[in-house]
Amino acid sequence: MSTLPLVALVGNPNAGKSALFNALTGARQKVGNYPGVTVERHSGRLALADGRPVELVDLPGAYSLEPGSPDERVTRDVVTGAQAGERLPDALVVVVDAANLDNHLRFTLQLLALGLPVVVALNMIDLAERDGLVLDPAVLSRELGVPVIPTVAVRRRGIDLLLEELSTAVGGATAMKLRPSDPALHEDIVTLQRRARRIATAATVSETPTRRWNHLLDTVALHPVVGPVLLLALLFVMFQSVFSWSEAPIGWIETGLAALADGIKDVLPDGFLRSLLVDGLIAGVGAVIVFLPQILILFAFILVLEASGYMVRAAFLMDRLMAQVGLSGRAFIPLLSSFACAVPGIMATRTIDDEKDRLTTILIAPLMTCSARLPVYTLIIGALIPNTRLAPLIGLQGLVMFGLYVLGIVAAFLAALVLRRTVTKGASSGFMMEMPKYQWPRLGDIGIGLWSRATIFLKRAGTTIALTVVILWALASFPQAPSGQKQSEYSIAGRIASGIEVVVKPIGFNHDIALALLPAMAAREAAVGAIATVYSIDNPDEDAGEVRLADRLKGRWSLATALAFLMWFVFAPQCISTIAVTRRETNGWKWPLFMVGYLFAAAYIMAGITYWLAVAAGL
Amino acid sequence: MSACSLEHLPQRQRATVAAIDWDRLAVPEARRLRELGFDEGVGVEVLHRASLGKGPIACRIGRMTVALRRAVAGRIQVALIA
Ligand SMILES: Nc1nc2c(ncn2[C@@H]2O[C@H](COP(=O)(O)OP(=O)(O)OP(=O)(O)O)[C@@H](O)[C@H]2O)c(=O)[nH]1
Ligand SMILES: [Mg+2]
């Protein structure tokens, strides 16, 4: 373990700690305009003004040293040195929001009482100025007895001064020790709060009321009627765009991949290697990669919602509905991020105070339609739902997609309702949340967010999915089928699939689906890769560019089967990472196993009902 | 000077917190409320109310905007500022 001096960034939620962390270390930690973005410690390195390297940790925001939620516990443990195997920080950078001093100074006073060297970053000074607030850092510094540096983390203002003060603070002659007996540590919140308010007033030079954009925006966004309609419209546009804006870029990627496959066919002789490359990797992994544009569009929307401050407004609007299923509006934020991926969504539940509330949210998070389902949905919808326009901007395919999202949400709510009355029974918890000021989303932040998602997606396609598809390709290629028999049925994979088919036949699944279900356990998108690989193996002579995967499906699947397959994916917990993170966040196997069990049962039943109804309706 | 609970405070009517019925709040709720700056004498104002029936309210406390449920707001007595 490194023995570099340790400096921790601490402060209230949404004060700009992560933005400052990024400015100081050049890292790309996620920043977002709502409390509770960071839920675990992240560390990075930086060089002080005098060149000494130190380790900097970014911590989850907290309101006090008495933790209310699991993320706040992390912060408390780090700054008090209680974290097992962790050293006590050598200094703290306390980040406060300049426009919200009376509240943020209270936690600062508590942190000062710890006795560690402190530098205060008076952050968001630009927003304070926008609000007509003039502060005197010198007064603040005198009152607190520590250096105070005005900063604008997102514009790197004040960083150099901060580094200089930090050089003095770190490794000063006296070896600092915690003073757990300091009376201020145990002073009650109210007393500290009053002191904080007094200091804030003293440090305020002048205050001129300004126009209140925030209030105006909220008058619309939180309006009893307009607000919910706006939220619904936003979600609708989001899902619709995922479908309609991505058509062109998907086409380009498909063309590129087809050219690549044809190029390889021209160069390599027919045989083992060519099949591995063309049928295995390009068909399988390519079938997944084409969905990159859709995933990026979805993430762009979510990132803008997060950066603007709308997220907490959405939580506010949803609270009433969430209360009816025994959750709080707060849970809506992790659930909305689960549209991107359930893994960060489940991590984000750490901000929920109530244990039962949090557990319920974890258990229903996999029902939110994550981006890994997009490839599956898109493929099936594209193949079997006609692309008719119902109205300008509204297509039938987009509507079905929206319907699947809504279905996931409704299912999640129903699941919460049942869970809260059975396995996670408990008093309903409250909803209390700070609402951040609106901010114009910063293009750089969105860009970084998209970039990191794109890398994660491509890495996953290049590792997990590539590996799954190659294994499947091998199992589906051997042994060679005698002529007249289908390779996808004769091979090892085909025989395994025939075994699975027995179980899933009653709900309308065919041999193709049975074959795709096992690789889908590694990652949902792998189902698409698997189907593509198998079709490619079955039709080795076709030019890749000639017949699109969707067109191949058209002839082979009935609509009833396709609908049942879609329904299966709404529920089925086919994602190893989600199961793993659930195990970690609930400290054991009990809840992940329960989650997998109830979701598979729901998937089987719902797919079955869909199939039987569709068949009865003559589809 | 008249008084009522924060739950029934008219929108945009400036007021100060007169008393908070801590004993009738759940322990974690009371702690959060204190942490968000609720205390006797602090200025408050109701900014927005979600849906007409129930739903949370958004209020300004000090310089912060905070969302809370009506049940909690009902435990907070406020004194109107003329
Ligand atoms: N205008 C302005 N915005 C800032 C500044 N610092 C941070 N922000 C924005 O404030 C929001 C919160 O920043 P974060 O760095 O995520 O805050 P945090 O303290 O890490 O928050 P948690 O992880 O939730 O505790 C983001 O939208 C940032 O872009 C600043 O100095 N000026
Ligand atoms: Mg953060």
Image (cartoon, coloured by chain):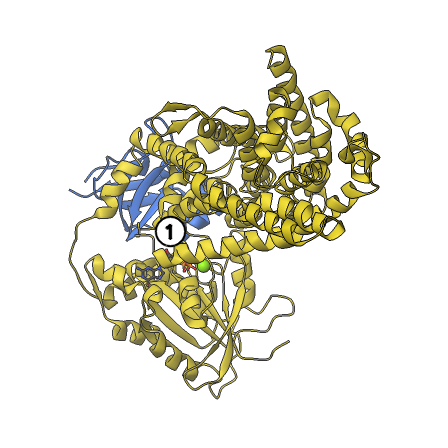
> Label 1 is placed on what type of residue?
Ala
Q: Residue at x 47, y 81 (%)?
A: A170
Q: Is residue A352 visible?
A: no
Question: Chain B is shown in which shade?
Answer: blue
Q: Is residue A508 above or below residue A164?
A: above
Note whether ligand 1 is within 8 Å of mark 1: yes
* Disc 1: host chain: A
Position of the C terminus of chain A by quadrant: top right
Question: Depth check: A186 or B32 in front?
Answer: B32
**Seen in the image, is A564 located left or right of residue A145?**
right
Position of the N terminus of chain A by quadrant: bottom right
Question: Chain A is shown in which shade?
Answer: yellow
Sort mark 1 into few (<14), some (14-19) or many (20+) by Cα contacts within 10 Å: many
Task: Report the residue that reaches farthest toward the bottom.
Answer: A173
Q: Is residue A116 visible?
A: yes
Q: For residue A284, what is the image quadrant?
A: top right
Query: Which residue corresponds to mark 1?
Result: A307
Element at badge 1?
Answer: helix
Q: Residue at x 29, y 46 (%)?
A: B60
**Seen in the image, is A580 located left or right of residue A39?**
right
The x and y percentages for residue A371 are: 53, 42
Question: Depth check: A348 or A526 in front?
Answer: A526
The x and y percentages for residue A570 are: 59, 32
**Seen in the image, is A181 located left or right of residue A16?**
right
Q: Residue at x 56, y 50 (%)?
A: A347
Question: Depth check: A457 or A414 in front?
Answer: A457
Figure quadrant, ligand 1: bottom left
The x and y percentages for residue A17 are: 42, 63
